[in-house]
Image (cartoon, rainbow, N blue to C red):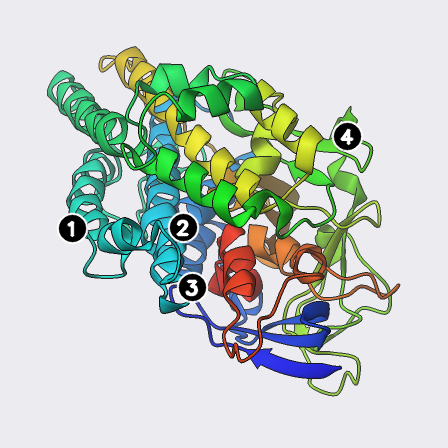
Amino acid sequence: MSRMLVGPFNRVEGDLEIALEIDAGRVTSANVNSTMYRGFEQILKGKQPMDALVYTPRICGICSVSQSVASAYALADAMQLGMTPNGERCINLILANENMADLLTHFYLFFMPDFARPSYAVQSWYEPVQARFRAVSGEAYREVLPARAEFLHLMGLLAGKWPHSLSIQPGGTAKAVDGHDRLQMMSILAGFRRFLERRLFGDSLELIGQLTSVAELQQWAIEKDWHSSDLRTFIHLSQQLQLDQLGRATDQFMSYGNYSLEGERLFRPGVIDGQGQRRPLDSQLITEDISHAWLAGQTAPQHPEQGVTQPALDNVQGYSWCKAPRLDGQVMETGALARQLTNGHPLITDLVARSGGNVQNRMLARLLELALVVPQMERWARQIQPTEQFCLHGSLPDYAEGVGMIEAARGSLGHWLSIREGKIANYQIIAPTTWNFSPRDQHGTPGALEQALQGAPVLEGEKDPVAVQHIVRSFDPCMVCTVH
């Protein structure tokens, strides 16, 4: 038995440290430590409720829109305020713009560069892969950054700036869209589609989105050379390295659903249990456990409406600043894989039925989501009516509760707001990486990543195990959001 401390991780937003116990070349136990505490939930106490729209986006620079939308939804819930159809479409476009940029960035700049590591130099596929995906200097790096930058011009049109836009409001968006803006949006989306279809997929978005089974995906992949598109390259690497056998966690999945429009969500909310059965999401069953966190103020797991975020280093069982969220006491995995599984996409359903939640399936779900959402963004943009209202206005009561639950790129994001005497009395946030990178709970049950790391191979002499890197990155952690 040996021990290894892995971290800090490069190409990860924020600080992360993982303590591994290793026996016979395999990880037997992992403790995941979110090393940074900032205290946004304490900062918000006593502030004017609308100030949350200014503070919460600053939790993170790469998913600030997600925080803004969740906060706006929580305030709208407290105000019992609806949104105009134009406002909903614009908020969906802004949120999807950030989420799709995140998914693209993760694949090309965070995940794929690990296959250009010297440890893979003996592999037959290494030379073309490292030439394309090597960090900073690879071909893909030079192609992706301009495509991403052009795509994010949509954010400028709709939100003014990114990150930390203030255009997202409880009743819609503060910036109206005229006919010229709409034409510009369609042009930007068409350009992004061209990049995805030419380089990432090598095929139409619609064809990728309509794949219904593993057999169809495999047949599609062998129709052209493995290096003819980046998705085919990933599938080839996954087969060579058996990524479908790496990083399996709880096989329990949760999604809050995403992209609301007129009472429906494009991706529906739900839960998939350990037997693969889908059931409705009951958010009242969410609790946060602090038994293994450097926190105090709770003697038992609490629903976030009653949650306390109070730092304390005297917890002898603590090894992370992260709380342990649970749904009805169960560990949940969240993210694109959970979104598409709870939404019932047939390809993802087949993949998980065969091999569960793993490195390969998490990545395929992210790429599939790009193929599904970009065409929907085109539809939302066409449906905007420039002559109609974009935002409703309301007043905040002196006493109210509000909840905002959405899907960020990395998974389920929830904001719980309590207003007393016109001020914020409590504000609790559970981010996607809080779910996935949680420590153990009061029963000693490891979090999703801690379970996914069990069994990971550690080769002799490795100080930075590549299998561990693949598993961690397959969740796409955002550590600054984890503890806020």
Q: Would you name the residue on which mark 3 appears?
A: 12
Image-based side of 216 in relation to 268, left or right: left
Query: Does label 1 or label 4 sit earlier along the sequence?
Result: 1
Which mark lies nearer to you, 4 or 2? 4
Image mark count: 4
Q: CA distance from mark 3 to mark 1?
A: 20 Å
**Label 3 crowding class (10 Å Cα cut-off): few <14, some 14-19, many 20+?**
some
Q: What secondary structure is marked by label 4?
A: loop
Q: Would you name the residue on which mark 4 appears?
A: 276
Image quadrant in which the N terminus is located: bottom right
Q: Are marks 2 and 1 in contact (CB under 8 Å)?
A: no
**Label 1 crowding class (10 Å Cα cut-off): few <14, some 14-19, many 20+?**
few
Image-based side of 384 in relation to 371, left or right: left
Q: Amino acid at mark 3?
A: Val
Q: Would you name the residue on which mark 2 appears?
A: 63
Q: Are marks 1 and 4 in contact (CB under 8 Å)?
A: no
**Label 4 crowding class (10 Å Cα cut-off): few <14, some 14-19, many 20+?**
some
Query: Does label 4 or label 3 sit earlier along the sequence?
Result: 3
Q: Would you name the residue on which mark 1 appears?
A: 142
Q: Which residue is depicted at the point 36% across and 27% down?
A: 391
Q: CA distance from mark 2 to mark 1?
A: 23 Å
Q: Is residue 120 above or below residue 303?
A: below
Q: What secondary structure is marked by label 3?
A: loop
